[in-house]
Amino acid sequence: MKLKKKYKSIFFAILGLTILLTSCNKDDVKEVTAADEVVGLQKIDTLIKGNYTFYIYKKDTGNLVVGYNEVYIQLKNNVTGKYVEDATLSWKPLMHMTSMSHACPYSTINKVADTKTLYKGYFIFIMASSDMEYWEVTYDYTSGKDTLAEVTNRPTVVQSTGKIRYKSFKGVDNTSYFLALVNPTSPKVGTNDITAYLYKKVDMLTFSPAQNYTVEIDPRMPDMDNHTSPSNVNLTYDSTTGLYKGKLNLTMTGYWKINLIVRDASNTIQKGDSITSTTTASSIYFELEF
Ligand SMILES: [Cu+2]
C-alpha cells in the first residue's frame, strides 16, 4: 500500500515536470522573422517600385559572375511594411550589346523550402558586362493578369577569376552549349555529389535545357602525374530538377582538373576528349582546389 502510494507520487512528479518543461519550451519558440531568413546572404540590390521593394541577395560576396549564379529575393510591401509570402515572381535577363541584344539561360523563381519570405532562382550569365554593353534584369511581381510591380536593374556581371566552373562551347552539331558547375562548392576528400546545368542556345533570346545528355567526368591531378581516382559516376539528367547529377571522388586535397566529355541523347560526343598518354586534358573541364 505504502509502496503503491510512493509510485503514484513519483508518477505525478514526473508528469508535472513534463508539463512544466513542455510549456517552458513553448515559450522559448522564437518566431522566425524576414531578417532571420536572409542571415548569411549578401544583399546586392535594393529595387524600389511603387508600393514594393525587391531585395536581391546572393550567397557569396562580390559581383555576379559569368557562369552559375544563385539569386535570392525578398519582396516587401512598403505600405504594410510586411514581406510578401505568396508572391508570383518572374524575371528576365537581357544583355544590351552595341550591335544586338541577347538573353542567357535562367530559371523560374520559386519559394525557398521552409521559409516564409524567401524566393530563389538562378542565372547562367554567358558574358561579362562592360561600360558599353550591359545586362538588364527585369523583375516582375504579378497577381493573375495584373502586374503589381515591375522593376529593371543593371547588375554588374564580371568574369570569374577563380577556378573554372563554367564553359561554353560549340558542339559537333554546331549548337552553342553552356555548361555550368553547381556543386560541389566546398569539395571534400572522398565522394562528392557533383551537379551541373547544361543548356543549349535555340536563338538569341531562347535557351533551353539540353535533356538526356551525359556529362562524363575524368578527374585528374595534373601536378601529380595526372593521376585519376576510382569510382566516379558520370552526370546524367534528372528531369525533376533539370540538373545533371553524378558522383565525384577526390582522393586527396589539392588541384583537380575535372575533364569532361559531353554526349548527346544518341551518345554522340558533342565536345570533349578522353585522357590518354598524349592527351593530358580535355578541351572542356572544370577545376577544383581545396
Ligand atoms: Cu553579350
Image (cartoon, helix red, strand yellow):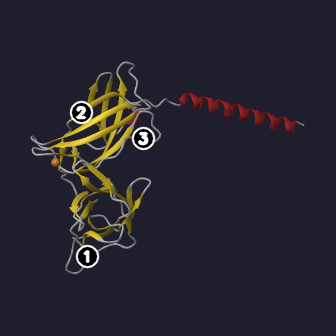
Q: Is residue 41 above or below residue 75?
A: below
- In-image side of 180 versus 4 (left or right): left
- In-image side of 57 versus 94 (left or right): right
Q: Counting other residues with Cα less than 10 Å from the Cα at mark 1, is it few (<14), some (14-19), or many (20 or more)?
A: some
Q: Which residue is mark 2?
A: 152
Q: Identity of the amino acid at label 3? A: Val
Residue at horizontal 63 percent and vertical 32 percent from the top: 22
Q: Identity of the amino acid at label 2? A: Thr
Q: Nearer the viewer, residue 187 or 261?
A: 261
- For residue 237, which numbered disc appears in the image? none
Q: Is residue 191 above or below residue 50?
A: below
Q: Mark 1: which secondary structure? A: loop
- Considering every residue shown, the one lying at the far top of the view is 79
Q: Which residue is mark 1?
A: 275
- Gap between marks 2 and 3, in whole Å? 23 Å
Q: Mark 3: which secondary structure? A: loop
Q: Counting other residues with Cα less than 10 Å from the Cα at mark 2, is it few (<14), some (14-19), or many (20 or more)?
A: some
Q: Position of residue 172 (x, y in %)?
A: 23, 68
Q: Position of residue 262 (x, y in %)?
A: 30, 67
Residue at horizontal 49 percent and vertical 30 percent from the top: 30
Q: Identity of the amino acid at label 1? A: Ile
Q: Residue 254: which quarter of the image?
A: bottom left
Q: Which residue is mark 3?
A: 112
Q: Is residue 219 above or below residue 50?
A: below
